Structures are given as C-alpha cells and as structure tokens.
C-alpha cells in the first residue's frame, strides 16, 4: 500500500511540475526526446524531483503543443541510489513497486491539458520485458538512453499497445 501511495503522489507531483522549470534544451527525435508509436516528442524542459528523501526522478517535457497539449516522459530511479550512471532494467509502474537499485521505471503521458488536469493518454511499459536503459552523467546532468520497449495505455485495456523509445538529456 505504501508503494501505491508513493506512485500516486509521484504522478500527481509530475502533473503540477510541468511549469516549474526554467531549464531549457533543444534537439529533436533521438537527439533529445522520445517517441510513442510513430509520434516524436522533443524535450523542451527537464525537472528533477524526488519520491523520497533524495532526488530520484527526472521529468522531460515537450511543450510544443502549448498549455493544452503538454507531453511528458518520467524516469524514476531507486530511492536508495537516486539518479546515477549505470545500466538499469526497465520495469513497469503496473507492477506496483518502486524500482530497486538496478532498475528504473518509465512512464509517458500525452496531450496533458492544464485546464482539465488530465492526460489524453498515459503509457507504462508492458510487464515482463527484459530491456535495459543506459544512463551516463556528465557535468552532473543525466543522459538516459531508452531502447524501444512495448508500452500500454493506462488504465489497462483502455487503448492499443504501442512502443516507446528515446534519449532524454537533462539540462
């Protein structure tokens, strides 16, 4: 129950942080962004936050659609290790547990509308995949390379499964 609560708090916090960062970066496609299915998103801003005592999560935000069409990718590291260089197994939020030291959790949301406070669709990795992401740290900033994974809309069964991949460069 504690982990479900933390994940819920994390999701709510991410919704409120879409306007909290002045961090700016540029790039597109695989240079600094992600894709859900055949749609590419470009990282416009990034924001670090925590689900516990240390910073252990990064949100990448594409704001090209304006306030009525924000898109996000969230990467959550272990609360024990925080954001660190290494190779991490990608796990699904649908498993209901926060990541262990050798794992990261990824989610994506599309078409967030600030007026309603809702995403059009949220995606989580399909459970049971054995795919690893690579994280490097340069100058204190993370670069997260996520190979193609299968994702499913949440709530489960609410839409068609698709793919997610990307390179998120923290600025």
Image (spheres, rainbow, N blue to C red):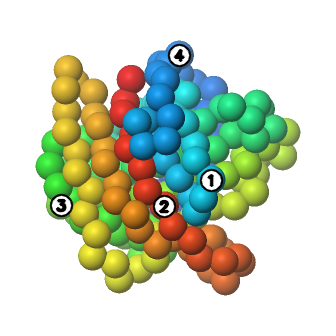
Helix, strand or loop at disc 3? Answer: loop
What residue sits right under mark 2 in the picture?
Answer: 164
Mark 3–mark 4 distance (CA, rounded to whole Å): 30 Å
Q: Residues within 10 Å of mark 3 (few under 14, many from 20)?
A: some
Helix, strand or loop at disc 1? Answer: strand
Mark number, residue 39? 1
Helix, strand or loop at disc 4? Answer: loop
What residue sits right under mark 4 in the picture?
Answer: 22
Mark 1–mark 4 distance (CA, rounded to whole Å): 25 Å
Q: Return the residue found at the far left.
A: 86
Q: Position of residue 78 (x, y in %)?
A: 26, 53
Please name which of the two marks, 3 or 2, marks the residue nearer to the observer: 2
Mark number, residue 151? none
Q: Position of residue 5 (x, y in %)?
A: 50, 62
Q: Residues within 10 Å of mark 1 (few under 14, many from 20)?
A: few
Name the foreground residue: 56 vs 86: 86
**Looking at the image, is mark 2 or mark 1 earlier in the sequence?**
1
Mark number, residue 102? 3
Mark 2–mark 1 distance (CA, rounded to whole Å): 10 Å
**Looking at the image, is mark 4 or mark 2 earlier in the sequence?**
4
């Amino acid at each position: 129950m504690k982990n479900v609560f933390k994940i819920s708090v994390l999701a709510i916090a991410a919704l409120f942080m879409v306007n909290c960062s002045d961090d700016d970066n540029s790039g597109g496609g695989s240079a600094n962004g992600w894709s859900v299915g055949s749609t590419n998103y470009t990282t416009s801003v990034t924001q670090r936050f925590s689900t516990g005592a240390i910073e252990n999560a990064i949100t990448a935000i594409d704001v090209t659609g304006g306030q009525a069409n924000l898109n996000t990718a969230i990467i959550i590291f272990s609360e024990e290790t925080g954001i660190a260089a290494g190779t991490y197994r990608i796990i699904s939020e649908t498993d209901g547990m926060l990541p262990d030291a050798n794992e990261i959790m990824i989610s994506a949301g599309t078409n967030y509308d600030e007026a309603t406070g809702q995403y059009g669709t949220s995606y989580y990795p399909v459970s049971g995949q054995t795919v690893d992401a690579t994280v490097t740290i340069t100058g204190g900033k993370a670069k997260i390379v996520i190979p193609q994974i299968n994702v499913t809309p949440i709530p489960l069964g609410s839409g068609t499964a698709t793919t997610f991949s990307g390179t998120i460069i923290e600025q």
